[in-house]
Image (cartoon, rainbow, N blue to C red):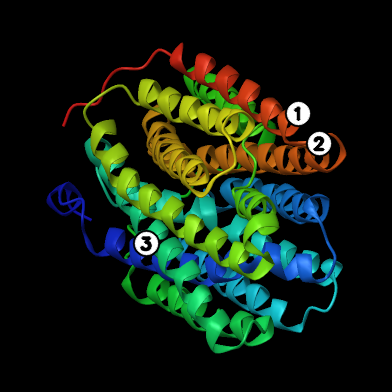
Amino acid sequence: MSNNQKSRWLNRTVLGIGLASLFSDWSHEMATAVLPSFLAGMGAAAAWLGLIEGISDGLSSFAKMASGFYTDKLPRRKPIAVAGYLVTAMSTASFALATAAWHVLIGRVCAWLGRGVRTPVRKALLAAAVTPQTYGRAFGFERMMDTIGAIIGPATAFLLLMAFHHHYSPLFAVTLVPGAIAAALIATLVVEKERKPVPHISFGRRIGMLPGEYRQFATAAGLFGLGAFAHTLLILLATQKLAPTLGATRAASIAVALYILHNVFYAAFAYAGGWLADRFAKNKLLALGYTLAALMALGIILLPVHIWTLALIFILGGIAVALEETLEDSLCAELTDESQHGMAFGVLATVNAVGDAVSSIVVGALWAAVGTTAAFGFSAALSLAGAWLVWRLRTQPAKA
């Protein structure tokens, strides 16, 4: 790929990866939006949801690390990405056959293993398709497209729930369609540039070769991740808080609508965050995202229960996730050499997955055993600690 082609950041590869993210998120967010209600119908509570999300994220971390390490040594990464998208699509659709919570756990684990394999590969392909000066916009565009899928997904789920009279199996089966389209888009649109595979070096040495600034950044991301619970818990929160006054069915519908609102703000701020990342210090913007996540958690504890206060919590959550994901990816690419991108993105994805696993399980368990104050207070404290550490990272602002 020529320098002139790379300078046009919205090229065929960036567009292909963005569209694939849109369709893949459309697929699994259809399932995610109704998953809390589906589990509640089985008699499973917050602890089960936290367990499903936590174990899935935890096991996928091994896939992310292995994929990042292994694919740096391959001349072509794209086939691995296509396979990962297909596994995620088929495993998410398998929820249609679930009759118990442990069935959902198995399907989610398989889906997230596929997602884990493809994540560092997709990010390395994206970083290789653009210049360092446009990392923010490229990653912001991908996150925006991903989140447009996350808006369409719950909206589709909402319509299909009514069409299928609140029967979940046909809805889960439909998720296979956009999931398969995502895999096809990666296969047909993404152009993988020629690259020289890195020579075989032990896993430990490859970790040690990553820059010190990157390791400090990964530590901050890990600290934040220990409190960054899966936002499916927000759907469960809204459902439980509103059900006593509105009834279970209406509460579940409003919770899905609030999640759509969350994803609208996520999409809007993903590209905005990327645009800012190409002009200002990425670590400062990332610290802001972590701080907003802490404010969201504190809002759950301190604000009275009302549709409008819940809307504010979902909005803060959407903005926080947008800044977090866009800035983490672009900062990761900036702090490491292109030859290290697979490993760097694999490490970051693994750190985030382990953090998500711990936080989802701990927050879900604290919520079930003690209450929301302890659960979300834990989240807020660790989010602020991560913000402080990443703020102290020494980086140079990117030049547009």
Q: Are marks 1 and 3 in contact (CB under 8 Å)?
A: no
Crowding near the residue tagged with mark 3, few <14, some 14–19, many ≥20 C-alpha atoms within 10 Å: many
Q: Amino acid at mark 3?
A: Ile
Q: Are marks 1 and 2 in contact (CB under 8 Å)?
A: yes
Circle 3 SS class: helix
User: Looking at the picture, how far across and down is residue 279, in whole percent?
Assistant: 21, 28
The residue tagged with tag 2: helix, strand or loop? helix
**387 left or right of 379?**
left
Task: Classify 71 as above or below 328.
Answer: below
> Which residue position is annotated with label 1?
374
Residue 300 at x, y percent in the picture: 60, 35
The residue singled out by tag 3 in the image is: 148
Q: Nearer the viewer, mark 1 or mark 3?
A: 1
Camera-side residue of 83 and 302? 302
Look at the image and tell me in which quarter the N terminus lies: bottom left
- Horizontally, residue 161 falls left or right of residue 59, namely left
Residue at left offset 22%, top offset 35%:
133
Residue at the image position 46 percent from the left and 65 percent from the top: 78
Q: Amino acid at mark 1?
A: Ala
Residue 366 bears which disc, if any?
2
Using the rendered image of the protein, determine whether residue 195 is visible from the camera's viewpoint: no
**From where the camera sits, is residue 398 visible?**
yes
Measured along the vertical axis of the image, is residue 278 above or below residue 393? Answer: below
Q: Position of residue 28 (x, y in %)?
A: 56, 68
Looking at the image, which residue is at 54% across and 19% down? 216
Q: Which circle's residue, 3 or 2, is located before the other in the chain? A: 3
Alpha-carbon neighbours of circle 2 within 10 Å: few (<14), some, or many (≥20)? some
Quarter where residue 227 is shown: top right
Above or below — where is 52 with respect to 26? above
Say which quarter of the image contains residue 255: bottom right
The span from disc 1 to disc 2 (Cα, nearest Å) is 6 Å
